[in-house]
Amino acid sequence: MPKILQYRRCAVLLGVKMTYSRKLKKTGKEFAFNIAVNSISILIIIIVLVPLIFVLAASFSDPDLVLKGKVLLFPKGFTLKAYHMVFENSDIWRGYLNTIIYTVAGTAISVVLTILAAYPLSRSQFFGRKYLLLILLFTMYFNGGMIPTYLLVRDMGMYDSIWAIILPSAISTYNLIVAKTFFETSIPNELYESALLDGCGNIKMLNKIVLPLAKSIIAILILYYAVNMWNSYFSALIYLNDDKKYPLQIILRNILLIGQTEQFGTNDVGMAEKIKMAEALKYSVIVVSSIPMIILYQFVQKHFVKGVMIGAIKG
């Protein structure tokens, strides 16, 4: 065999060997990276799931065993007494109804206001939109504080009413920016131009073109606002004085405060029984109050990733 063919053959074999070694090296790095990512993901899942499983197990367990710390991941002394107490407690159901009203009304108002504000800010023809965005961004980092906000709510006649819960937090600047970015990046300008040629105004364009194409971001806004409103208790604690208007979170807070008296110790049989009842109610109310948000997520989960990723490309 001529030497030149031998050299070529050696070069080919050397190249194949180097390529194979690089692939092995790359495969080894990818394998190690996948192990690290999967390990971290499993750890995060465990950290998130363990408290949830504990709450669920404690809601079906004997309160005495829960107080003694004998319940961890599986129910002990299985009982439905806590759920019977929930269904028989009129304060809990009244708080549940109030929370549903606040959440539905607040979410509807917040989504409508956010879309009405995000749409004009997404149009490049809107004069002064950069300055308005700067003003909105400023409110993300600075606000008047709790006392000025309280005085404003009181002077506007919203104290001890549903509007004190809904209106002060009606628009989230973050959600507004996400919606604005979605409108900018996901809806082609050609659609706007064709609609203008057909004689569409801004209101008709919003109703007929933008909203049908914005189902993903609307679903995300509904989820964000609903979860925030459902879990909110601080506004009700400050602005509501009538206990008949308290949301479920305030009722749960009062139950927790009763349970915390355990740390002082007591020989009173009546107080000890109240502590057991509070301990039983605490976990069952948490489970019951979480069900609506779990159900809501099932309807919007298919839009969740798409809406968040598209709306968060750039600000």
Image (cartoon, grey):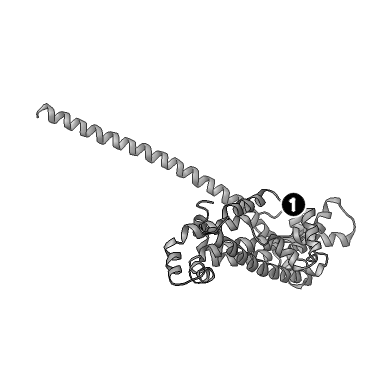
Left of 256 or right of it: where is 299?
left
Instruction: Let me know if residue 255 appears in the view.
Output: no
Q: How many marks?
A: 1
Q: Which residue is at the front of the view, 4 or 315?
A: 315
Q: Is residue 292 visible?
A: yes
- Where is residue 301? Give x, y as percent: 53, 63
Q: Amino acid at mark 1?
A: Gly
**Which residue reaches farthest top?**
3
Task: Please identify the quarter of the rendering in which residue 178 is found.
Answer: bottom right
Front residue of this view, candidates 33 and 206: 206
Q: Residue at x 59, y 65 (%)?
A: 116
- Picture layout, residue 133 above or below residue 215: above
Q: Classify mark 1: residues with Cα within 10 Å, few (<14), some (14-19) or many (20+).
A: few
Looking at the image, which residue sits at the far front? 127
Q: Quick check: 33 left or right of 20? A: right
Q: Quadrant of residue 251?
A: bottom right
Q: Looking at the picture, how far across and down is residue 121, in whole percent?
A: 56, 58
Whole-percent x and y of residue 71? 69, 55
Asked where in the image residue 240 lies, by quadrant, the reply is bottom right
Q: Position of residue 135 (x, y in %)?
A: 64, 52
Closest to the observer: 212 or 62? 212
Q: Which residue is mark 1?
A: 144
